[in-house]
Image (cartoon, coloured by chain):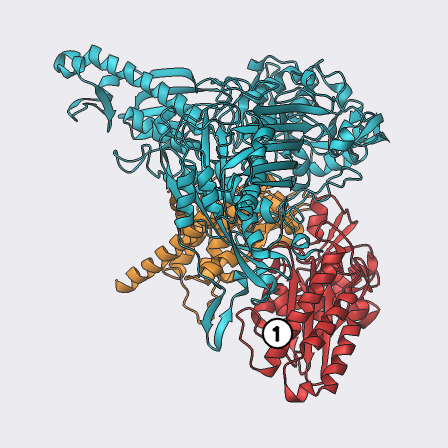
Chain colours: A red, B orange, C cyan
Amino acid sequence: MDFLRPASWEDALAAKAAHPTAVPIAGGTDVMVEINFDHRRPEYLLDLNRIGELREWEVGQDSVNLGASVPYTQIMDHLRAELPGLALAAHTVGSPQIRNRGSVGGNLGAASPAGDSHPALLSAGAEVEAQSVRGTRMIPVEEFYTGVKRNALEPDELIRAVHIKKADGPQQFSKVGTRNAMVIAVCAFGIALHPDTRTVKTGIGSAAPTPVRARAAEDFLNAALDEGGFWESGKIITPSIAKQFAELASGACNPIDDVRGTAKYRRHAVGIMARRTLGWTWEQYRGTGPALLEGAA
Amino acid sequence: MRVNFTVNGRPQEADDVWEGESLLYVLRERMGLPGSKNACEQGECGSCTVRLDGVPVCACLVAAGQVEGREVVTVEGLADYAQHRSSEHPGGACGSASGSCGTSLDSAQRWQAQPTGDDGRLAPIQQAFIDAGAVQCGFCTPGLLVAADEMLERNPSPSDADIREALSGNLCRCTGYEKILDAVRLAAARQVSQTEQEETV
Amino acid sequence: MGVTGSPTDIHQSTASRTRGGIGASTPRPDGTLKVTGEFAYSSDMWHEDMLWGHTLRSTLAHAEIVSIDVSEALAQAGVHAVLTYDDLPTATRHYGLEIRDTPVLAEGRVRHHGEPVALVAADHPETARRAAAKIKVEYRELPLVTDEASATAPDAPVLHENRTDEHHRYVEHPNILHRQPIVRGDASAAAERADVIVRGEYHFGMQDQAFLGPESGLAVPAEDGGVDLYVATQWLHADLGQIAPVLGLPEEQVRMTLSGVGGAFGGREDLSMQIHACLLALHTGRPVKMVYNRFESFFGHVHRHPAKLWYEHGATKDGRLTHLKCRIVLDGGAYASSSPAVVGNASSLSVGPYAVDDVDIEAVALYTNNPPCGAMRGFGAVQACFAYEAQMDKLAAALSMDPVEFRRLNAMSQGTLLPTGQAVDSPAPVAELLRRVKAMPMPPEQQWLSAGSSGQEADVRDLPGGLSNTSHGEGVVRGVGYAVGIKNVGFSEGFDDYSTARVRMEVVAGEPVATVHTAMAEVGQGGVTVHAQIARTELGVDRVTIHPADTTVGSAGSSSASRQTYVTGGAIRHACEHVRERVLELGRTKLGSYHPAWATAELLLEGGKVVTESGEVLADLVDVLEEEAVEVELEWRHRPTEPFDRHTGQGRGHVQYAFAAHRAVVEVDTELGLVKVVELACAQDVGKALNPLSVLGQIQGGTTQGLGIAVMEEILVDPKTAKVRNPSFTDYLIPTILDTPTIPVDVLELADAHAPYGLRGVGEAPTLSSTPAVLAAVRAATGLELNRVPVRPEHLTGT
């Protein structure tokens, strides 16, 4: 095993081009587990800790340009207003120690269907900035996940940043785990209201081979809200609409049975989370709901 | 490979490090600092919690090569670290409006640990763990101490919910956590009363 | 010797001469070492020229080993030894706590997933791992035995041929490891009197001790051909008796010292790396360190027996139990470990702390290809308590009675006969504990709500799901449940349960000092704290030195079965009494002529002085002892027990009992099936709290382990392959501080006149009733039957 320690982003891209099998390591929260438990023996480890710009972020007009290695703790502390869904998701990642090291870039690189960032990125809308010595690609996050723990990166590419749409409305994130902290998602659900475009977007985690949007549920809800004039009136969403939305969200799942839960439970739980988070975001949109210490946008 | 970094204020060098080694392994097996514990080696227990440039992290998930040139504080250096902080920010609280003061890298670099236990001096959180009965087998204790000390640095008057959240990455199998909560409350109360005394003086 | 981290004496003085005896919450003598990181655990040992040992384990649960080729591994640079079964030095190649059925290394066949097959010693852990990966093992798969049906089928593969153990003659099938029936009265006739009969089938999942300090240690070859072994264990001498014959060494040449133990809970009763490290050290002539990682730890020790329990109870209209019929099947896995004792406890305590005269009970342990199971906190009694307490709630419901009142009506008391016919001959305050736990104030409703800037705010940290933000109050229903349990203290069924203490008193630096030397394994429970307290109380000294536990002193027995404070504490007290007599004798000889009280009065040692009962000081201990040291080593045992009759289960099998009761308050998100335990109140009788703070720590810790199995902890074994599916802390979940509620404790102290100071073992009882109390509360919140633990979201949502 070789340990590559590029001091700059350009050096990192050059190293990745020279050694396409190199495994990037930033927070180490996935890679080191695999090394400690002898599940993986990469030929090269490519350390990204020395590249300061990966830990920086920039709040733009429409989106946040989030460096690939910005730790979750920083997102929770500094980007709760711009990225409320992602901040909520970040708060459910592992433990304080893990959140001090883990990052959205790492979550995307690992591309586990159980990664906590994914539903928040899918519902907010995001693009992954992939770079190589050949140039830069912007990959819509929906197209980034290509299979279980597989992503759209080419062997010579590294994630430079994630460009996430700033919230234009309430966002929520829910995750089911069988412990109240430090737990991998049995399943998760993200939702974002986009009043500017009068649309709702969603993300489902850990209930399909890849993170997915519940597109049929979104289409149904967008149409129902539009037809009923809900965006203008701000009236309460009828239970039948919420129920149908929840059922369609369940239907978007393609889960498996594993040690963390059954497929049937995952479908069920995604439906419950879809209904609840829709209710919370809509209440926030209407401006009448109770504020929540943890859930407030 | 060779790795140079600072541990508890002292420059250290490790040679012939296998590239897959963790910071935890280097501390325990190469530097004679086994205080950081090896309970899970997968970031799920917090018993190896150390501060890396001031930030609490699981040493088992930091690759040895990643600490090149950086500052590490372990439980072995905690008493002196707390002493140093106390002289920098009397009473432990830093009084910043944001509630986050931490220890600056610059400040950390100026500090150097004394040999452990020379004068039997303990950090307030260490004394509180003994007094409150928060130690049983003790394997989780070093990681909890580093995590709890860092929380009290940021948040000198934590609520129970704050304590629980800050320590939610540290598993304990012996105590049921009640005495650990007591210990952190005790350390926080002593910190406040010390501040008040100093202000009175 | 070059060993870093070798244990040394622990000295403790207390601030005042009148403090630090029994009954005081003296701080731990090892506390400072533990908070500074200096306390040397078994994984912290280091030797300058040491090698790293590594174990190659089976990838299959049941297979014949056709061949093993180690040549490529041996050829790798940095590898110093590769050992297999064929390299074992003597004809003794098996070990075991009760039955020596466990191969040191697999002998032509593996019987469970993760069984040790070969050992490697190398200059770096990674070298050893890479070499182990090069060992070629050819397996031929054998049919699996995974449950009672497959184990006892006529054509079932027999896991242990030609059994010679004491149990084999009493079982109907060689895959039944042990069977204990208990019959008293006439359960069928009594059932005729019942107005209601309730039945249930219960399932208890496989729990792991999950101690945080992994199996580890250092073996150092000695010049005399022997070996020095530093290790974390629960019983040094039981280890020694199993290790030495395999090494072909006399016990004197295997010198064991207890290293720091990072928790045990039963999981260190059986050997793990002890023999392996010694074999590698003796083979290479180099010190060898072995440290399991968490993955390997799940294969490195036995687990709590999963169990299936069938129960039938009857009761009359006025709420009196009529009878109990039950059958308990415990999965012992591939090797015996302490399964026979687990069967003994499960059967003899299957009725719980209730008075029932007519019983028909059977408990069996099976040999299967599942992971071996053995001791864990409350062994045998834990599984039974889950079932009988569920039955009590069902009976109360069937009779429309309050579940606590129903229990109190049937609660045992001093003099009640156990199903074994043995009378409980010490206080049994079962009804009182239930009354107390019920009387404790209830936690406030909807405690997640607090007044905020815009009305009421919810803190998700106080809701089911916690930070995962699954509910802001939706679907949340509160439930309250109660349970009570009984656990035997000490080793039962005729076992010669003794401990050895060596106590020395001398003057050091002008002060009388007591040194206590035992082989007791301090596993975190605080044995060393109470040992020093006992010495202070009995010898009137302030300064006490605790000698490291090792095999140069006699056996202390195991740090298990809640027995150490009773038995080793008793031995220390007894040794102190002898030391005191010798000191007084010395005083009489030297100073007797100066005061008539030396000859007549009852004399005590207090505050470093010899005093009369009325408090008159006769002499300073310093003057009595001068240059002399008084040392006594002796064995001490509790009252003898006897085995249970093989056919009727009758017999005076137990010596003492511990009782605890719990009230659980839970909040269940009934839509998502997530449980938040809000509070777990406990009332326990401890006889006499030698160290009240330690007692609370034991009760709260035990309670939390009971919570764990109630709602999250389970080793999942694939029934198709008998392989462990979740050997990691990512998927074997133990409670975090956010899962653990406040645990108010009410301690009762009703002395057991037969025990030292009236004390009762404390550690296990709270683990029993915690689990069924949580389940009762979840049932109350959901209305579901819930007959298995851990209860999972799927069970609560019908998915």
User: Is residue A71 shown to the viewer in this render?
Assistant: no
Is C678 or C63 nearer to us in this picture? C678
Query: Which of the 4 image quadrants contains residue A114?
Result: bottom right
- Amino acid identity at mark 1: Trp
Asked if residue B83 lies left or right of residue A251, the reply is left
Q: Position of residue B5 (x, y in %)?
A: 58, 51
Q: Is residue B72 above or below residue A66?
A: above
Host chain of mark 1: A
Q: Residue at x 36, y 19 (%)?
A: C574
User: Is residue C522 shown to the viewer in this render?
Assistant: yes
What residue is pinned by disc 1?
A280
Is B96 or C25 nearer to us in this picture? C25
Is C269 or C158 nearer to us in this picture? C158
Q: Residues within 10 Å of mark 1 (few under 14, many from 20)?
A: many
Q: Is residue C535 above or below residue A30?
A: above
Q: Where is residue A25 in the image (x, y as percent from the top left)?
A: 71, 56
Q: Which residue is drawn at 54% across and 33% down?
A: C351
The N terminus of chain C sits in image quarter: top right
Asked if residue C338 lies left or right of residue C413, the reply is right
Q: Residue at x 39, y 50 (%)?
A: C439
